[in-house]
Image (tube, coloured by chain):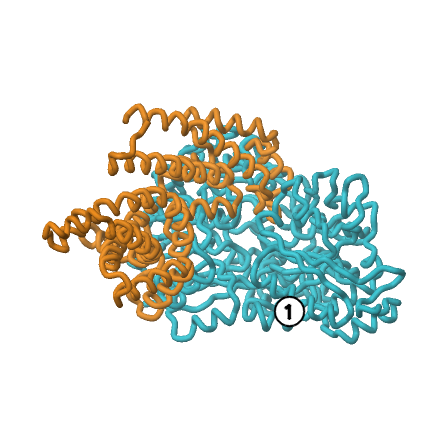
Amino acid sequence: MLDKELRSMIGQVKDGRMDRRAFIKRLAAVGLTAPLANQILALGGVAMAEGPTTYKPTKRGGGGALKLLWWQGPTLLNPHFATGTKDQDGSRLFYEPLACWDPDGNMKLVLAAEIPSIENGLLAADGKSVTWKLKPGVKWHDGKPFTADDVVFNWEYAKDPATSALTIATHRDITVEKVDDLTVRILFKKPTPFWADAFVGAPNTIIPKHLFADYTGSKSREAPTNLSPVGTGPYKFVEFKPGDLVRGQLNPDYHMPNRPYFDTVEMKGGGDAVSAARAVIQTGEYDFGWNIQVEDDVLLRLEKGGKGKTVYAVGGDTEFIALNFTDPNTEVDGERSSMKTKHPLFSDPAVRKALSLLVDRESVKKAIYGRAGRTTANFLNGPEKFVSKNTTWEFSVEKASKLLDDAGWKPGADGIREKDGKKLKLLYQTSINGPRQKTQAIIKQACQKAGIEVELKSVVASVFFSSDVANPDTYAKFYADIEMFQIPLSQPDPSQHMRRYLSTNVATKENKWQGTNFPRWVNKDYDAAIEAAESEMDPIKRAAHYIKANDLMYQDTVFIPVQHRLKVEAAANNLRPIVSGWANETDNLHDWYREE
Amino acid sequence: MSQYVLRRLLIAIPSLLGISLVLFVVLALAPGDPFAELATNPNVPPEVALALRAKFGLDDPIYLRYLHWLNAMVHGDWGFSFVSRMNVDTLILQRLPATLYVIGSAQILALLIAIPVGVYAATKPYSLFDQIANTLAFVGFSLPTFFTGILFILIFSVTLDWLPFVYTTDIKGTGIRWVLEMIRQAIMPVAVLGLFQAASMTRFVRSAMLDVIRLDYVTTARAKGLGQATVIVKHVMRNAMIPVVTLIALQMPAVFGGAIVTEQIFRIPGIGSLLITSILSNDTPVVMAVTFVFACLVVLFNLIADVLYGWLDPRISLR
């Protein structure tokens, strides 16, 4: 039904009977907004348009200093080596992608002249190639012209395994060719519904060929430009002290009119989130604080009569509890949580369902995340187009108890339920992080009421998320019954995110626990849905496949979503930052300004 | 004397080797790895993380890695940071000025408080001044720096809005304005560290003075008719300062350690905060280098203390 309606609406937009904004509004009404709405139009044959701009300044510069506080400062400034978003954020001050994402998930042009679409002929109808036209007249900070050669070079640089670029996955399966000096074409091996990955967004900014050409492959780490970037961005590089400070000054030759507004930019690192919030909101020493993961109570207190406020951006990050489908306590061939075992308790679906009923998402929101969280029943929470409407959640100790009673789990003498000599005792692990430990406590309490004993375990984040094969406490080994964390959705598309749970990706001793399917859940229907989605060029059908995949996870209770988390930033009251849940904080920095 | 120093320096070599071996093994056995953040990044395939581990030699056996490290160190190569992809020595040299500035000022502040207060308290033991000085000293060294640091921030930055609590290395302005800003932003961290040091030092100066003040030669000096000031400064302090100087020299490494917390609170880009961030991101080459620098400092200041001792007190012979 939705399918037909959408199609006729796309037709109306094409004929000009409905304007683009009305189309997006209609989609929003049926829960299909955000980035993909525009991609729907692009694939439906209507050009993707830029979102409206709210930029007010009428001249370049004059805005004074912009002081940014990143409590984890960037440690290097080559986007291809960025180990975390902090490094991408720092690099993005100087380097630019072809296009970036605005807060609504619309594509926004940076170094490209035109957004590819089927209508303008830049996007192939079969989804196997996309052509980018580059903006003419763009110059690197050292005065050399920016051309298609630079774009092609970035692909060659990153795809070479000897370079050990962390952007290799984006680049190794594509081919990039130069059409003319200001045109490049990306060829995909198979139909690629989400074509806006390479050269788009802060993780994929473009470095200059003339300064890196001599430092490819194994020589990559010797490039002097790794630490003193020469880009095309709004700010020119001045100074870099790893982990402490990045400084830039206005680029007088910047290719966008009236931009940037600020004369200098400074990104200070170090400290912790709470004191960063204090320095922005309470004392006003800084203009913008990154990633303020602080309890809402504290933020509300700081905001009272303060000099700044918190800023939120909706993305697709979900804090979840994963259930282990294998037995963490039995060792088979030197491997715990082996695929040859079944979890003794969770093999009963009633136990999994009961556990889901015991997660009080509303209390977690109220007590911990506040304005930075939303309750949800889904694992996949964005972009909107992919969010399932078929699911519900509920918190009820009574229902959980009844479910367990009916399934034969009776309370023993110590109040803990048991069946066939197996006691309902769970080990619940997560990384050390204030909100996570509080969530653990809330859930443990509810479980106790229902006769489930929960033992809590917290692991230092650097160990928990480590790929160290020798360590037993990593999330991938999953030597516990349930574990909680989040995996960021780094682009406005769920494909990479959902691929992780294919049955071929199970984490085992054989693949050194590098497999991404850590719950070790195997479901043929899920595999089929993901595979169908990956080659489906029709955006509506593709979304339906991902929704089905999400619903399969929901039915099997693979993940218990705890909270849909929003990005939280702190900003001075007069600063107008543009922050997107689909991009890095500095991705739209050229459009930031201060209200006089 | 020079022979003694030379011999001590030679003895320092095996002990530094031993220290480096212990540090290296402990760090190698510690859990975690520098590429942890990659694991949940959906853009980075797991093979890439494995290839990086191999490239940085994280999969080699420990003894091989230690020998590599030692060999490089002998040739003046401090190693290569996994996280910043730059040389460790550049990283440390970049951070050193801030640390030296803050720690040096704190130490001077501590001495300026501890010596006059300790000496005056010792000349009038159990007087009201002595009682107050003692109480404050006890309070001072019982309160950890992370507590006083936050307390200072709440009072002077948040409530009174007098001082900034984020330390910046690039202060705008030149000349006198630069100097004033530099002093202004260092007031809180220097006060926190300096007062903590001063507290224990005051106690030490006082007891050292009390030990000497009762000796017969002091009574003799007084009997000669010398004034109180001359007796205290020329006769008592001179001898009482011998153990104090040693203590200060020996405490220097501990001061560096104590600065780690303070640097973190006030975001001072010193080697202490470098150590913390490197530990958190499992950047072992940097952790190794910074801890090794601390080890060298301990050995060096021990040596300085011994030499100073002999110089101040000729009765002690150095052989």
x then y, percent, for residue A536? 71, 51
Residue A517 visible: yes
Provide the letter of the chain coloured cyan: A
x then y, percent, for residue B207? 31, 53
Label 1 Cα crowd, 10 Å radius (few <14 / some 14-19 / many 20+): some
Q: Quadrant of residue A369?
A: bottom right
**Left or right: A388 in relation to B137:** right
> Looking at the figure, which quarter contains the N terminus of chain A?
bottom right
Indicate whether A448 appears above or below A264.
below
Provide the letter of the chain coloured orange: B
**Residue drawn at 84 percent across, 64 percent down:** A418
**Residue drawn at 46 percent across, 39 percent down:** B286
* Residue closest to the eye, A86 or B59: B59
**Residue drawn at 31 percent across, 57 percent down:** B191
Q: Quadrant of residue B157?
A: bottom left
* Residue closest to the eye, B232 or A112: B232
